[in-house]
Image (cartoon, helix red, strand yellow):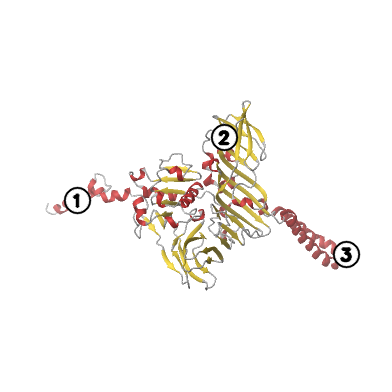
Amino acid sequence: MARRAPLAFAVLLGALLWTGLPGAPGGTAAFATSPAVEAREAEPEGSGYREVVETTESLATQGDLKASMRVVTLVPDRGYTPIQVTVHNTGGQPRPVRLSIHSQGRVMERSLELGPRERTVTWLMVPADLQSGTLHLDSPGMDTVSRGFYLDGYRGARVMVLGDVKAFEAATGLSRASENTEPLVATRFVEPHTAPRELAAYAGYDAVLVAVPADQVPDDVWAVLETFAVTGGRLVLDQPPANPRLRFPLLQDEKAELSPYGFGFVRQFRDCRKQAPGCGFILGEDAKQSPAVVVPAGPPPRWQRYSMLDDGRLPLLSSARAPVGRFLLLIFLFVMAVGPGGWVLARRKGPLAVLIAVPALALLTSLGLVAWSVLVDGFRVHAARYSLTLLDRERSRAVTVGLNAWYANLAEDSVRMPASSVLLTSESSSGPEEPPRLLDWTNGLVVKNSFLPSRSYREWGEVAVVPSRARLTVRKADGGVRVQNALGAPLQGGTLKLDGRLWTLPELADGAEGLATPRETEVGDEDLLGLAHEPLMRLQGGVTPLVRELGDGTFVARLGGRGFTPTAALDVELEAALHVVRGQVEEARR
């Protein structure tokens, strides 16, 4: 009996421990979960933020010219990385200055003209695929000054913040993430008064947060931020203006927490301050759900050179595809002429005739290939152009997301883009192939040297806000609707909603009039857009605003021609073009 007592005690103790284990049947709540465990389970994935600390580094200039730059800078997901440079002319005479960044054989430059004792903050945009570079400063009467720098290539959600760390933490409630914790976002802080005035500086970041009061942001910076939002960016306002429509005229509900705005979104921190998980988590979600509105296809990885483009996509230009069938036929004919034909010729005319005929035949074949290239491909630039456009008739502007495919037998060296537009290259995993070697940011963007290399297929994306008086005029007549095409391009069809009824737009030349026909059934998204599969996949991030339900007086039209983007000024031979335009009609009065 005495021997069984310790054994019974051990069994009883094991049973008590078992019933107290978490998850065990009959386990106590106290042992199952503690408040600390519950808190950890309630936390969202990722917490806090990662601050990319920028420092000011002075350049070893001489004389009356002083300069500094901000390093290390957070690289955006796409587009361009803005590098801040401050230049101060302490002398009493005007001084021209040329700033340039050199990286991997590419040059990004900007020219300045500084007045006496003038201090200016300027920005140089570096393509986002570059991670380092060297800044050069040149001015007459002094030696070139240079300084190397590196960039921060964090791969998570990236946010540009207009304001300082204190304002950001007060707005979001986030604190710095610990070393072993994945942050919700990585941040870059910019002083609002010296913030960039060019769209390209913002377009690559997943979101832009304005963490200061509205009156601390200059008017021209507000204009760029509005352009950023309407062209597909996510703009977040911690302290919205008293009248948001003064800064964002396309807002439908100025008190809404999240509002669609053109191709992008505007969020105002309102209800999230009072609700879990808080504004910081909402910002992180916005930054993660920020797809590009246009994604040009790039070259495939080096281990997949059998594919024509990245992800197995097909070129948008038929002239960029080699005529494999014709080449095989030509090779077959050449082999037959040299082989059996040479044998017959040798038997009839002798070996000397073969020695003359075979080189002559090869020469004629080569001349035929050259003639084919000249007569069929020519020396012009071939292009396919697609775009999605929102017409803002009240402000006489067109908000455009464009996709352009190019093929040139001879290199096209230069193209100019205004400050309200961005030229976007592909996001291929292998990086751009033969990228432009010189970008001049003095007045907007001028791409110099190898915008289009010879005999190479390239795709470029564009986002832009450009002035436009394009419009569609309608007039009610005899129970029907007459339409006048003043959109600046041939009308290939579309849909109009007027007086609660749907109408099908006719095909019309630019400036022509025609009669719209009533439509009894709703139109699907594919029929409304009319885009083929390949261009649609590249523009997938921008189609939502165009396929929303039509309001009264709203139309969606399909146009030919070159479209509304800045590169439409280039003289090209169009192989394919389709531009989907949405806007409000202009009703003509008798």
Inter-mark Cα distance, 2 to 3: 72 Å
Q: Furthest-top residue in view? A: 478
Q: Position of residue 240 (x, y in %)?
A: 40, 46
Q: CA distance from mark 1 to mark 2?
A: 75 Å
Residue 303 lies, in percent from the top left, at 56, 60
Quadrant of the image occupied by residue 434? bottom right
Q: Nearer the viewer, residue 529 or 218?
A: 218
At x 67%, y 49%, the residue is: 574
Alpha carbon of mark 3 to alpha carbon of mark 1: how far? Answer: 111 Å
Rendered view: 243 above or below 320? above
Q: Which mark is residue 11?
A: 1
The percent coordinates of residue 176 (x first, y second) are 35, 57
Crowd rating for badge 2 (residues with CA inside 10 Å; few <14, some 14–19, many 20+):
some
In terms of image quadrants, where is residue 437?
Answer: bottom right
Query: The residue under label 2 is which amino acid type?
Result: Val
Q: Residue at x 32, y 48 (%)?
A: 42
Residue under label 3? 349
Mark closest to the chain's N terminus, 2 or 3 = 3
Q: Is residue 50 left or right of residue 324?
A: left
Earlier residue among tags 1 and 2: 1
Mark seen at residue 523: 2
Mark whose residue sits in front, 3 or 1: 3
Q: Which amino acid, by three-letter code, is at mark 1?
A: Val
